[in-house]
Image (tube, rainbow, N blue to C red):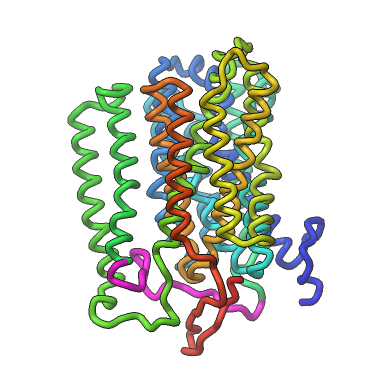
Amino acid sequence: MSKDTGFNLLSFSGKMKILHMSWIAFFITFFVWFNHAPMLAAIAKSLGLEPGQVKTLLILNVALTIPARILIGMITDKFGPRITYAALLFISSIPCFMFALADSFTQAAIARFLLGFIGAGFVIGIRMVSEWFPANELGTAEGIYGGWGNFGSAAAAMVLPSLALMFGGDDGWRYAIGITGAMSLVFSALWYKNVSDTPKGSTYFKPKKSGGLEVTSKGDFVFLLLMKLPMYAALALLTWKLSPEGVKMISSGTALGIYLALVGIFIYDCYGAYKVNHEIFVKPVPEMHRYKFKQVAVLNILYFATFGSELAVVSMLPLFFSETFGLDPVKAGLVASAYAFMNLMSRPGGGWISDRFGRKKTLLILTAGLAAGYALMAMTNASWPLWVAVVVAMACSFFVQAGEGAVFAVVPLIKRRLTGQIAGMTGAYGNVGAVVYLTVLSFVSYEIFFGVIALTAVVGFVTLLFMEEPQGHMAEVREDGSVELISVS
């Protein structure tokens, strides 16, 4: 095992091999998830779509990711990352091929809705990486995984339009999207053959019960139910957006049906949480096995502000630059892509800083920078030199993505056997943030939009004061009943 002790990015063995396989898997999920975005004009022309239908495809693409991240988190904890990622990549290639072959809006819409599931792949790698790296390298490793994988969406924007042109004709986009499905299919086999859930001799800790997140006190149980509400509210908001009050894709009767279904699922979800946790109402959990759910809640709110704002801003930034500074679409796209490029260094940077200088201190500094960055973006106007506006956007982007890296430097240090589910909930909150911010944007000016994000970052900063720095060890019980102490500092 001695060769496995260093952190050498050029190595492709041991834990480093797992890291490289993980970020490539995540990269492919984002490459597939956003494969339609750079070719929307060609797709709209080919299928004869109206502007409202194009917007609907964009909304449908992210709708399923909120519940999918929760579900995939549970599946990962129960069955392990190896089989879960392989299955997700394999199954997701089917709606990808469906989209490539679609010849009507309805077919394209169904395929896009199902493809939201691949956006949950992120959660699987968080658990995988946490199994292979010690606490002092975990932030850096998770940051590389998140940052390099996330770049898949930017890579899709750079590569796929040229690929479609290479094939040429009205169906060029279909071949380009079909190739992304084939990549997903091939890598699912490569992943399955080349990784294992833990290093040799290590235990893969699974939740004691499946069907909901375990908590360790009565107060935390109430807190858990409260934290579920915003996720259902975001899905209700998406439904409203698709209803006659929004883009008129579904009838008011269908919308009402979805609202009632969401209420039913929420009640069932709460019952599932009670079934998993009912024992805490009978006898208290021993101190050694407790964890504080407030740690999870704080990270959820911070990811709402960081990843939520990133998803929202990436989709509106080209338009913002072209309208504010009168740039043509190509230049505006290039300027805006600087925001996505920052991911390659910023997210690993946030994780690295967190490893070196402490989890809480890093998050406090980055969240303050985030609030200041968006406050400056709210002040950006046509009287500013363009280069200043670009520098502000890139600086803001650094704090956003470094903040994401720092959040996921803490997630795996809360409770090992629940890491997938905690990552799933925190990840879902990022999508909730995107839904909320994009809905706000449809009603207000760019200035107010950026101001609202800055305000939520301030709320995140205040909640962060309640988080505790991970210290000492977390305890997990092996199958033979013995206790393993896992270092978290």
Q: Is residue 215 magenta?
A: yes
Q: Residue 1 in the image: state x and y as whole percent.
A: 76, 77
Write the residue at 48% across / 85% down. Answer: 479
Q: Is residue 322 left or right of residue 114?
A: right
Q: From what the image shows, is residue 61 above or below residue 138?
A: above
Closer to us: 303 or 234 = 303
Closer to us: 110 or 338 = 338
Residue 76 in view in this figure:
no
Q: Residue 273 in the image: state x and y as whole percent.
A: 29, 64
Looking at the rendering, the stretch of residues picked out in magenta corresponds to 200-219
Q: From what the image shows, is residue 59 above or below residue 424?
A: above
- Dividing the picture into quadrants, the one containing residue 235 is top left
Q: Is residue 325 magenta?
A: no
Q: Residue 487 in the image: state x and y as whole percent.
A: 60, 75
- Dividing the picture into quadrants, the one containing residue 34 is top right
User: Which secondary structure class fits the magenta region best?
Assistant: loop
Q: Quadrant of the C terminus?
A: bottom right
Write the residue at 50% across / 29% down. Answer: 101
